[in-house]
Amino acid sequence: MPITSTNRHVRPLRSQKALVTGASSGIGRAVAVAFGRAGADVAVNYRSSPGAAEAVVAEIRGHGVTAFAHQADVSDEAQVLRMFERLREELGAIDILVANAGLQQDAAIGDMTAAQWNKVLSVNLTGQFLCAREAIREFRRRGLRPEISCSAGKIICMSSVHQEIPWAGHVNYAASKGGVELMMRSLAQEVAPERIRVNAIAPGAIRTPINRAAWETKEAAERLLTLIPYGRIGEPEDVAQAAVWLASDASDYVVGTTLIVDGGMTLYPGFSTNG
Ligand code: NAD
């Protein structure tokens, strides 16, 4: 079927090829499936759950597109290089990267080990750097394909409201996401002249395995809701819809921006009753 403005609207990522890291669970899973629904072929990166990754692949294929799972630790340069080789072999090109893989290793500052600090920085920040660098090399190799997209490539960095909100007991995580913000904006500035768009999404509290303790019990969920003016915990699909838009030509003039998807968590809800 030729690409027309109508079917681009229905399947806005039609004929595009995407890599989503950390896509066997949570937000990454929802993004990967939404991309398949939007017409993209999707590589599902995972670290340690082949069964869960294959289930995501099966769901994506149900939308009539190509999908495969690839195991790689995004903080390991050799594994990232191998992953991009596989992308070239299986998909021929890549149009979209969602650098989503991330983790927390929480500790009060007096107890935080250097290993916990390094682990979080290496996955959440270095992992995004390595994947973004390889994606940009790929975009350059392939060049602009106007029949596929207005831009030569799109990168979406999964940040967090904690790129802005300080987070006691999580200094490694907050530092990693603060780093993601300036990495994203600097990259965006560097590659925008090549028609490569780099942006980020900063989710608030989204119901996924990473923050199970914050929503699993009624008491924890009630406490969490006091931080969310919109009055509900976010779902992975809320972030997935934002990612589809940011990856599509509908956002073609959006460059170097963080799209906050947080139900108002960054609106200083403590001040809503006059502080
Ligand atoms: P999640 O734990 O379900 O997803 C994280 C994924 O990253 C997992 O599948 C995990 O296996 C994978 N991963 C971890 N280390 C990896 C590595 N070295 N290589 C490859 N994959 C690795 O949690 P989530 O909430 O879906 O998190 C996704 C992203 O969203 C993370 O970057 C997280 O910081 C961010 N985020 C989540 C929330 C939230 O409330 N859930 C809020 C803000 C930001």
Image (tube, helix red, strand yellow):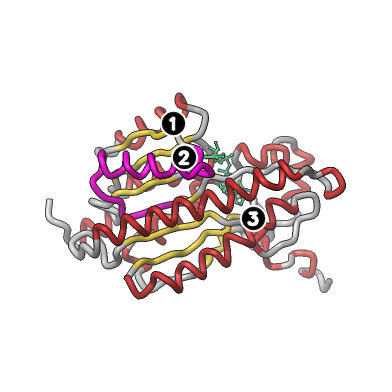
The disc, 1 or 3, on the residue closer to the chain's N-terminal end is 1
Q: Amino acid at mark 1?
A: Ala
Residue placed furthest toward the left: 2
Q: Secondary structure at mark 1?
A: helix
Residue 221 position within the rendered picture, expressed as x and y whole percent measured from the top left: 73, 43
Q: Which residue is mark 3?
A: 176
Q: Image point 58% across, 64% down: which residue? A: 181
Report the Cα–Cα distance between label 1 and label 3: 25 Å
Q: CA distance from mark 1 to mark 2?
A: 7 Å
Mark toward the start of the polypeptide (3 vs 2) = 2
Q: In the rendering, which numbered label is found on residue 23?
A: 2
Image spot of residue 51 (x, y percent): 45, 24
Q: Is mark 2 within 8 Å of ligand 1?
A: yes
In the rendering, at what x and y percent does residue 263 appear? 61, 59
- Amino acid tagged 2: Ala
Q: Identify the residue at image location x=70%, y=41%.
A: 215
Q: Is residue 96 above or below residue 151?
A: above
Q: Which mark is residue 165?
A: none
Residue name at image x 34 percent, y 48 percent: 18
Specify few, some or many for label 3: CA neighbours under 10 Å numbering under 14, 14-19, or 20 or more. Answer: many
Q: In the shown orientation, is residue 143 left or right of residue 136?
A: left
Marks 2 and 1: in contact by CB < 8 Å?
Answer: yes
Q: Residue 61: horizontal and vertical position, in percent?
A: 30, 34
Q: Which residue is mark 1?
A: 53
